Image (cartoon, rainbow, N blue to C red):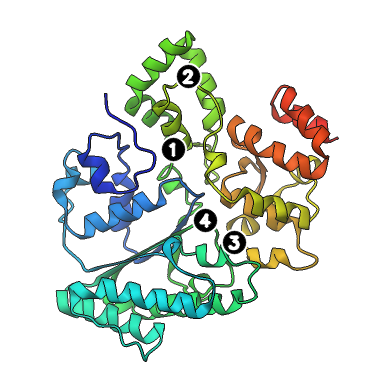
């Protein structure tokens, strides 16, 4: 039986160490042959974004041996090798614009070593990045690839920092260079949790393809029902035996606990990958919360809920437009008079809410908790903010379904 490693985001290690790897290379191939260059995809934390970025890196490094038996190796992909510039913004030092700029230069120096590029410390981020892209493409004789993981973290970590606008300017300059370097770039893939509307990646990059809510890629992250039942079949069998439940009852409870994430107007839903992995790695019988303890900054969201006076019993039922859901500016939420709809967008992008209903016309959605894990693990925290500790204790002792906790706050 294959092992499960929920903390491993290295594609190479997953496929060479005997761990379960759910083959998502069909989506990788489709993006590479789609005809575009610039792509952005947002998903909640711990949903596999870093693994996807590492998979793209392995593909563009022509590591075909790692993909034997996977979809992309069966469809005639030619495996050209390109210079890869991989930036992981989650590792950045970002307490100030200067600190972030220095980190970017250090990363460019590290990446540039293999291409004969040396950072000029007297020059800014824009000049150095432009030179790095040009040098890498000319040195290798192939267009370069830029991969940026968690692009939004420097901003999310500093929303209360007085220097946040200066940090945002560094982010803006970085992506302005990438936009302008289109002649030297084969492929750009950017991930994040939040789609900041006021960063140049979105405001001026008119050739950027945001596939975050594209139904073709709705299952690129997370596990579809068929993937769960195929890849985790042996673990499911052990779980059924351990609980004494029928397989049907077991699968129903598993679905209600960890499924339900919907990332487009299509009805397809996916399971939370880290919750599924943690659940089965612990024996497949303990139906408790996993992702809500590690998947995002719950305290930030609770603080924002308090700031906008979010009423969960009323505001959750109000539809929100696709424009608000897909892009907003979290920094605006810290200001007086912030719109409660921004919080719902933050909750959606962070993974605490998902699309429950598409309204007629397809331009607005009703959002709700995706499953019992999120509802039980997070709604109780919100209830403590709105209705006090007594309501939270009442919630914890009652049946945990959507209608029940709504009745509590009413």
For mark 1, give the secondary structure: helix
Residue 322 seen in the current view:
yes
- Residue visible at 65% across and 75% down? 162
Which residue is tagged 3?
327
Above or below: residue 2 compared with residue 136: above
The numbered disc on residue 285 is: 2
Mark positioned earlier in the residue sequence (3 or 1): 1
Find residue 384 and report its image quarter.
top right
Q: Are marks 2 and 1 in contact (CB under 8 Å)?
A: no
In the image, 210 versus 190, the foreground residue is 190
- The C terminus appears in which quarter of the rendering? top right
Find residue 208 and report its image quarter.
bottom left
Mark positioned earlier in the residue sequence (1 or 4): 4
In the image, 301 versus 63, the foreground residue is 301
237 left or right of 201 in image: left
Alpha-carbon distance for marks 1 and 4? 16 Å
Which residue is tagged 4?
193
Mark positioned earlier in the residue sequence (3 or 2): 2
Q: Nearer the viewer, mark 3 or mark 4?
A: 4
111 left or right of 63 in image: right
Q: Nearer the viewer, mark 2 or mark 4?
A: 2
**Mark 4, other Cα within 10 Å: few <14 / some 14–19 / many ≥20:** many
For mark 4, give the secondary structure: loop
Which residue is tagged 1?
273
For mark 3, give the secondary structure: loop
User: Which residue ends up furthest to the right in the rendered image?
Assistant: 410
Q: Nearer the viewer, mark 3 or mark 1?
A: 1
């Amino acid at each position: 039986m294959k092992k499960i490693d929920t903390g491993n985001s290295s594609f190479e290690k997953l496929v060479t160490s005997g761990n379960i790897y759910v083959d998502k290379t069909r989506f990788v191939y489709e993006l590479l042959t789609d005809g575009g260059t610039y792509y952005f995809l947002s998903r909640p934390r711990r949903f596999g974004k870093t693994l996807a970025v590492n998979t793209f890196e392995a593909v563009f490094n022509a590591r075909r041996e790692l993909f034997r038996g996977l979809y992309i190796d069966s469809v005639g992909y030619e495996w050209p090798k390109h210079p890869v510039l991989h930036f992981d913004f989650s590792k950045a030092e970002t307490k100030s614009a200067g600190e972030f700029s220095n980190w970017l230069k250090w990363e460019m120096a590290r990446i540039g070593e293999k291409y004969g590029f040396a950072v000029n410390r007297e020059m800014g981020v824009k000049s150095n990045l432009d030179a790095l892209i040009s040098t890498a493409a000319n040195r290798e004789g192939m267009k370069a690839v830029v991969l940026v993981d968690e692009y939004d973290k420097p901003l999310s970590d500093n929303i209360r920092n007085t220097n946040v606008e200066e940090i945002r300017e560094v982010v803006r300059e970085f992506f302005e260079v990438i936009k302008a370097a289109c002649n030297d770039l084969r492929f750009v893939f950017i991930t994040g949790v939040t789609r900041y509307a006021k960063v140049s990646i979105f405001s001026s990059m008119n050739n950027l393809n945001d596939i975050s809510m594209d139904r073709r890629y709705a299952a690129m992250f997370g596990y579809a029902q068929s993937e769960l039942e195929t890849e985790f079949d042996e673990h499911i069998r052990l779980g059924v035996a351990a609980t004494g439940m029928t397989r049907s009852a077991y699968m129903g409870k598993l679905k209600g606990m960890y499924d339900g994430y919907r990332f487009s107007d299509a009805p397809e839903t996916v399971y939370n990958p880290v919750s599924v992995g943690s659940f089965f790695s612990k024996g497949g019988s303990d139906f408790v919360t996993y992702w809500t303890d590690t998947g995002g900054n719950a305290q930030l969201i609770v603080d924002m809920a308090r700031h906008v006076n979010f009423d969960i019993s009323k505001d959750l039922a109000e539809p929100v437009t696709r424009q608000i859901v897909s892009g907003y500016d979290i920094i605006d939420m810290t200001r007086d008079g912030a719109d409660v709809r921004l919080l719902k967008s933050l909750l959606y992008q962070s993974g605490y809410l998902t699309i429950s209903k598409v309204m007629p016309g397809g331009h607005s959605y009703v959002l709700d908790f995706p499953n019992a894990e999120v509802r039980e693990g997070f709604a109780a925290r919100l209830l403590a903010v709105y209705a006090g500790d007594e309501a939270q204790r009442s919630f914890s002792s009652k049946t945990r379904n959507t209608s029940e906790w709504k009745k509590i706050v009413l």
